Image (cartoon, rainbow, N blue to C red):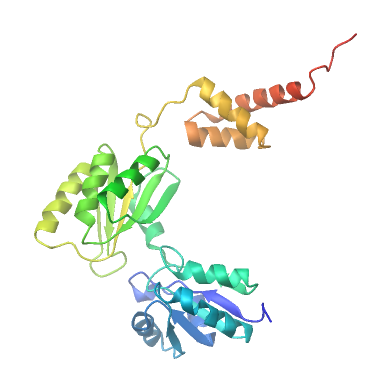
Amino acid sequence: MAGIGKLSIVPTPIGNLGDITLRAVDTLRAADAVFCEDTRVTGKLMSHLGIHRPLHRLDENTIRQKSDAVLDRLSAGEAIAYCSDAGMPGVSDPGMHLIAKARQAGFDVEVLPGASAAVTAFVNAGFQAPSFYFGGFLPRKASERERLFDTIRSLPAQLIFYESPHRLNASMQDVANAFPDREVCICRELTKLHEEVLCGSAVKLAQDMDARAANGSIKGEIVIVVDAPSSAEQPQATEADAKERAAQLVGEGMRAKDVARALEAELGIPKNAGYDMALAAKDGLEGAAHPDEGCTS
């Protein structure tokens, strides 16, 4: 019967094994079975923790074929834990398919909090924009990277990507071409013995990575953080554009203060001005709905 067993999504350290949480340890110990991307990687962690539970491989090549077998075990009332090789399962990770299948089948799914390379890099960069866009791994082809950067160029947010050390120099050249005036932070081997955080202009870091690639010294897991666009980079919305957008959002039922926040985030309109536009749009909408109000015959 669906809903008897429970699937626990267990984040694991992105490098330093000491970053495992107490709750994650308890969950792994209590699991009837642990499914993971690589039994060697998760097995090393569990051995370090003194935990001995049955381990089963469930990676991107097998998760779609074997997820039904996991659901069968949940139906039998088992407690199942799922781990990726490092960090939060489901973030650039095949675990999302298993989570979706389990939820659709009506099983309990609990997600434990824990380490994430993307968030760790976001904080490490020290950039001031409060929001970020996480794009997972960058596309392998330069043409696809170029199209992606064109699509998100004007987002008022930091841009965070994972990248392979073998492609870092080529990707950084594309970052420098797309965002020549931006600051970038490259985080390599976060929380590990040889952790390295490099921050500087996109152009300078692209040159540095090109030089490193030439002598084969780029290794490890890498996160790229691109700072948000400056006000000079962001397209300047006209007052007419802002009013039109305010009317659209009000028409969709959004409250004035939420419209003001949206106009600020999307178009750079100050909140007070955006709020006034929202109220004016609301008045206009109500007037259009009751054109004869106040008229006498």
Q: From this viewpoint, is residue 201 visible?
A: no
Query: Which one is nearer the viewer's eye here, 171 or 187?
Result: 171
Q: Residue furthest left?
A: 215
User: Does residue 180 appear left or right of residue 1 in this picture?
Assistant: left
User: Does residue 266 appear left or right of residue 244 in this picture?
Assistant: left
Within the image, what quadrant is residue 297 found in? top right
Q: Estimate the x, y position of residue 153 in percent, counting from the top left.
A: 36, 39
Q: Residue at x 69, y 22 (%)?
A: 284
Count of number-bearing discs = 0
Q: Residue furthest top?
A: 297
User: Does residue 156 appear left or right of residue 144 in this picture?
Assistant: right
User: Does residue 15 appear left or right of residue 254 in this picture?
Assistant: left
Q: Estimate the x, y position of residue 20 in percent, counting from the top left.
A: 42, 74
Q: Estimate the x, y position of residue 174 in percent, counting from the top left.
A: 24, 46
Query: Which one is nearer the viewer's eye here, 279 or 163?
Result: 163
Q: Is residue 175 above or below residue 27?
A: above
Q: Residue furthest front?
A: 65
Q: From this viewpoint, is residue 134 visible?
A: yes
Name the quadrant of the N terminus.
bottom right
Q: Residue at x 67, y 78 (%)?
A: 2
Q: Estimate the x, y position of residue 216 in percent, counting from the top left.
A: 12, 63
Query: Which one is nearer the viewer's eye here, 15 or 108?
Result: 108
